[in-house]
Amino acid sequence: HPLPLCPGTLPPRGARTRPDSGWWSGGLSFLEGFAGCLAFPEREKWPCQGRWAMMNDVRLRPVMAGEATAVEALLRRAFKDYVRGLGRDEPSPMNWLESRIIEGAVYWVDASRSPAGVVVTSVHENAVLEINMLGIDPSLQGRGIGRQVLTLIAAMAREKGFETLALRTAQPYTRLVALYSRAGFRVVAVDRHPDQIDEIPRVFMELGLKKD
């Protein structure tokens, strides 16, 4: 499935965005607080197009139509503690999820060939791929799966011709900002959530994907 184009939805590089700038969020924009090793095994591409895998069997595969209920259930488990840390009881409604699945923007994260997480992406102008959501099932967090997923997404995006991988996370989660920095992301802006759902600043980060 082609990924959706969402033009003009990322903040200008190197500039602080305005609270009223209207950047599209694609629903939730949380990233799982994963921990993992800094050394990655060599990646391999599955024979099936659009599927990517690590040598230790962490894989990405497109979510199919009809799987929205299962995807939402996993994302709600993954982000329950995160949103509570932001002062909310539960993640926001995900009414947008089914349409994003049809667009081909949502991926299962498989570990040992069983669903372990979900990734939601969007395409922007200037060859930018954004990670809108990356959630790992709480029972599998702390095993480095999320960190490996970042590597897989970067590899997939680079092969598809994207030049930048973008994400954002809440500023209070400094451990996440540090983790993404170690993975090569750099801070390009700090501002409120695009939908202004709270007063907590978000840190916008990017990873360059251009081949040398």
Image (spheres, rainbow, N blue to C red):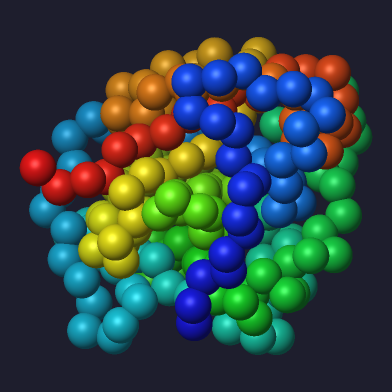
Residue 5 position in % (x across, y down): 57, 64
Left or right: 84 as drawn, with respect to 147: right
Left or right: 75 as drawn, with respect to 142: right
Left or right: 31 as drawn, with respect to 37: right
At x 86% / y 41%, what residue is drawn?
90
Residue 96 position in % (x across, y down): 79, 65
At x 77% / y 18%, what residue is drawn?
200
- Residue 37 lies, with reference to residue 119, above or below; the image says above
In-front residue for pair 2/67: 2
Residue 2 position in % (x across, y down): 49, 77
> Is residue 70 among the parts visible in the rendering?
no
Task: Specify the quadrant of the image occupied by residue 64.
Answer: bottom right
- Residue 68 lies, with reference to residue 20, above or below; the image says below
Residue 71 position in % (x across, y down): 67, 66
Which image quarter is the C terminus in? top left
> Is residue 127 among the parts visible in the rendering?
yes
In-front residue for pair 11/67: 11
- Residue 50 lies, with reference to residue 91, above or below; the image says below
At x 76% / y 32%, what residue is drawn?
21
- Residue 5 lies, with reference to residue 147, above or below; the image says below
In-front residue for pair 168/24: 24
Task: Specify the quadrant of the image occupied by residue 82.
Answer: top right
At x 64% / y 46%, what residue is drawn?
9
